[in-house]
Amino acid sequence: MKFITTLSLFLCISVSMLAQSIRVQGVVKSSNNQPIAGVLIYNNDTNETYGSTNDDGRFSILVERNVTLLFTSVGCKDHREKLKGRVQLDITMAVEAVALEEVEIVSTVKNKVIPEPTEIEVVGNYFHLRTRFRIPKEMFRSNTRLIFQPTIMNVTEKTTRRLKPVVVDGREYMITQNRLYGFDSSGDPLKQFVITKDSLLQDEIAMYHDSMFVKNPRQDFKADVDISLENYNKITYIDSTTIARGTVNPLRFFEYDLECMNLTDEQYLPKPEMQLCDDRGEVRLTFQPSKAAIDMNDTNSAAQLRELQQRLREIELDPNSTLLSFAVNGIASPDGPYKQNVKLASARTENAMKQILSLLSTQTREYMELSSSSNVESWQSVVNLMNADSLPEAQKLQDAIAKRSNNIEEQWRAALRLPFYKSLISTNYLPRLRRVEYSFKYSVFRKLSVDEIRELYKRDYKKLTRFEFYTLICGTEGKKFETLCRQAIEVYPKFMWAANELAVYLLQEKRQEIALLEPFINDKAPASVVVNHIIANLMDNNISTANELMSKLPADASLDELKSIISILNGNYALGYELYSKRGGLNEVLILLAMKRNDEACDKVQKLPMDNARNLYVKAVATNRLDKVMDAIMSLDKAFDMDPSLRELAKLDGDLLDLLD
């Protein structure tokens, strides 16, 4: 049905009324002037169901102009009213004073089980289906079983699910069943659903109420019901009808914004951890000519020896460090007989090893890997040093040794005969070749620098400690932040800080991962972790779970906003209304509608700006509940103009379905 506005709307409706049907509204009260809820309204001649009265006894139905209406309610006499074109009816129903058997209503409901039109109401993660159905006397005999089986369709996901059935057995049928099962009726698959006629409110009225968990309460549903009658041998009647075409859920537009909480308590932050690292050290020591002892007159050698011994001692005494290896290589200059030089180089190596390690304990030396080597420098090394200093004499030495390339002894003698040997070579260059080179390797547990952490991350992020992940995460944003958090949780599954920070990041991105914080939720969990887990569940529409999680929060936690939202979404509207009544706005109206305080909701919604589709849509709901049909239609028409997608929503909204008929 396409909605039009103002004068065109009234003209269209007028023509439609003359040709087809008119809207009739009114109120049904008892003889003591009390409104009667749940009064069923039928076409007296065709048994067509038009609707029922709301909690205030009000009704609004579309009917033919000259129809005779039948009003029926448990505990009251049926009331018939010839419409005669009237659009307003105030009905008074008399209290039933005679047994049902004496009330002749058979002809009006002949051969049909009539369920009452109802509505599905959403509260938290559950929807509730409440209805009742009338069983004609001539159909339900003593040898009959009736099965009433509702089916719920999730219109959003296009899935179906059956609710529990209600089974009503006649007296003879029940006796026969007991005999059939040897007076052990547990073999009857429907036994648990059977109600006796004594439990009915009246002889032919059966009540029904069941609820069902729904993953997403913002989705929409409708309800069909299958009804069958059977005797001992066959099914005598079967029918299927729709009893609820939509869902009553004014909180579908309820909006809130909860702030996520970072974990800042130091007791949950990772502490610095030391990593095992390898370091090396090197130094050169010089020796006297033809001597194995270190030249202590050389200030550089003496200083380096002391520094080396002190460094080794510090490593030895540091409980977080371990000396792993020590290597010495003694080198002799090429002057003199070669064999003698080789022996001298070896002696220097041994002497240096003893002197360097003299300050270390026997146990330390025992567990260190020690190695030594020695060699004699070549005369070519002397030439290279002289060339580095740009000396012309270097070429003469080069020529002298080139003629004797295969004999190191002859090379020494040739060099000895050069006129500048003593003044230049022996004095300035040979001493530079007499040395001991050493290196040592040790492992140490220490805190890595940020650069070292980054290098280790590139090599293998699985080797990072929690604190090193913490260091990197704190200096990162965006997608890299998410990646680092996930890697930290991968390596350390119980890393609560990383899990919480990732949860905050995802929630701020309007994403949620329920499993992320679940491992950390217990009675000792920090409030920030519990709050973030609650927000994630709310975002995932797990309202019941979010409500259960509130018990994990400290009693003194100042979380009024969260508590109010959880209360409202779980049906404790009054508890949460206090906060939103102070703020006003659309949320206040929605809560009032959920509480069925329709007059107040209608009054409040009139004060909202009517420049957006949602406000107009909710206004249509509020005014329609008070049977202000024309106001509701015009508001809904404007809402559809602003946001055409609301038309599809209205087709499944139990508060507005009658406006679309």
Image: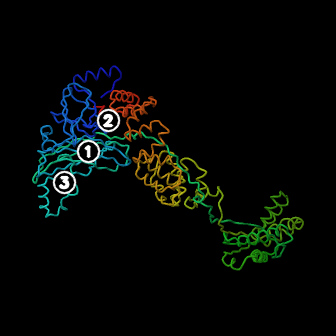
Q: Nearer the viewer, mark 3 or mark 1?
A: 3
Task: Tell me the CA gap for discs 2 and 1.
Answer: 21 Å
Specify few, some or many for label 2: CA neighbours under 10 Å numbering under 14, 14-19, or 20 or more: some
Instruction: Tell me where residue 110 appears, x and y as whole percent.
Output: 13, 40
Spot the residue most to the left.
233
Identify the mark nearer the N-term, 3 or 1.
1
> What SS does tag 3 mark?
loop
Specify few, some or many for label 1: CA neighbours under 10 Å numbering under 14, 14-19, or 20 or more: some
* Quadrant of the rendered image containing residue 71: top left
**Colour convention of the picture:** rainbow
Q: Nearer the viewer, residue 27 or 132?
A: 27
Q: Amino acid at mark 3?
A: Thr
Q: Amino acid at mark 2?
A: Lys
> In which quadrant is the C terminus drawn?
top left
Q: Amino acid at mark 1?
A: Thr
Q: Which residue is mark 2?
A: 651
Residue 272, compared with residue 198, is above or below; it is: below
> In which quadrant is the N terminus drawn?
top left
Specify few, some or many for label 3: CA neighbours under 10 Å numbering under 14, 14-19, or 20 or more: few
The answer to whether residue 110 is visible is yes
Instruction: Tell me where residue 404 appears, x and y as whole percent.
Output: 78, 68
Q: Nearer the viewer, residue 340 or 81?
A: 81
Task: Tell me the CA gap for discs 2 and 3.
Answer: 38 Å
**Tag count in the figure?**
3
> What SS does tag 1 mark?
strand
Q: Which residue is mark 3?
A: 196
* Quadrant of the rendered image containing residue 380: bottom right
Q: Which mark is residue 131?
A: 1
Instruction: Tell me where residue 136 appears, x and y as whole percent.
Output: 14, 44
Task: Tell me the CA gap for discs 3 and 1.
Answer: 18 Å
Is 331 positioned to the left or the right of 450 in the image? right
